[in-house]
Image (spheres, rainbow, N blue to C red):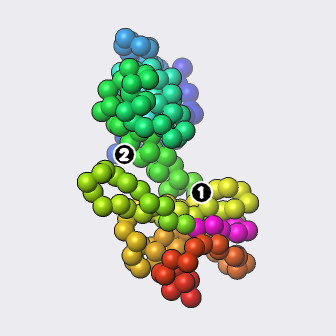
């Protein structure tokens, strides 16, 4: 019996937005059994978790969640790989995967924010011992604790401007003027004039 709800057909060329689909098969792997669906518009099959970080993973989803939780608590990639018996390469790949999904989610969903007050800062990011440090420009809406904007790059006038433009683009248009707390970094005052 076809159903009309999520998950939707992931094919970009599929003509229907809200896809009608039917159950297709069960795909069994070492750690799980996955349901596949068949789109009734384009006739292609797809997994239930397509478009999520768990798609095509050969490990349990719970292990992936554990890695991300440990990483957000500040554990190093090598530390996580030792604790969970995974290779450092796998841990790095999963963290990058989760970051990309989180960023894509924010790009779409952090929109029309009604801020009361912003706090902005630049944090030093050490990529490796040999490379020069980068800076993560960040803005957080103080009252809701919503992390609205992050930009990683060198500390330049251009990046400072891009960061504040991005912050502004995510707020409701014609909103009231609001205070922004930041440090005495020389470009901040220049771009906010
Ligand atoms: Zn389709």
147 sits to left or right of 40: right
- Residue 133: image x %, image y %? 35, 60
Name the mark on residue 12: 2
Closer-to-camera residue (117/174): 117
Q: Which residues are magenta?
A: 115-120
Which quadrant of the figure contains the N terminus? Answer: top right
* 65, above or below 85, in the image: below
What residue sits 56% from the left and 88% below the top? Answer: 193
Q: Which mark is residue 181?
A: none
Of all residues, the one furthest to the left in this rendering is 130
Q: Which mark is residue 147?
A: 1
Q: Is residue 116 magenta?
A: yes
Mark 2: which secondary structure? loop
Q: Nearer the viewer, residue 111 or 20?
A: 111
Residue 44 in sight here: no
The residue lying toward the viewer, choosing from 146 and 35, is: 146
Residue 99 location (% of width, % of height): 44, 45
Q: Residue at x 33, y 31 (%)?
A: 88
């Amino acid at each position: 019996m076809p159903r009309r709800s999520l998950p939707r057909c992931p094919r970009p060329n599929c003509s229907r937005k809200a896809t009608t689909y039917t159950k297709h098969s069960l795909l069994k792997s070492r750690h799980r059994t996955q349901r596949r669906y068949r789109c009734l518009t384009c006739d292609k099959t797809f997994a239930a978790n397509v478009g999520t970080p768990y798609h095509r993973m050969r490990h349990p989803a719970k292990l992936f969640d554990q890695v991300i939780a440990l990483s957000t608590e500040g554990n190093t990639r090598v530390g996580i790989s030792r604790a969970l018996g995974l290779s450092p390469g796998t841990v790095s790949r999963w963290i990058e995967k989760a970051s990309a999904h989180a960023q894509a989610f924010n790009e779409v969903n952090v929109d029309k924010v009604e801020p009361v007050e912003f706090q902005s800062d630049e944090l030093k990011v050490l990529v490796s011992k040999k490379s020069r440090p980068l800076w993560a420009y960040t803005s957080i809406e103080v009252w809701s604790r919503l992390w609205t904007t992050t930009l990683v790059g060198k500390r330049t006038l251009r990046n400072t401007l891009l960061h504040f433009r991005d912050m502004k683009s995510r707020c409701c248009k014609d909103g009231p003027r609001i205070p922004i707390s930041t440090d005495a970094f020389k470009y901040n005052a220049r771009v906010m004039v």
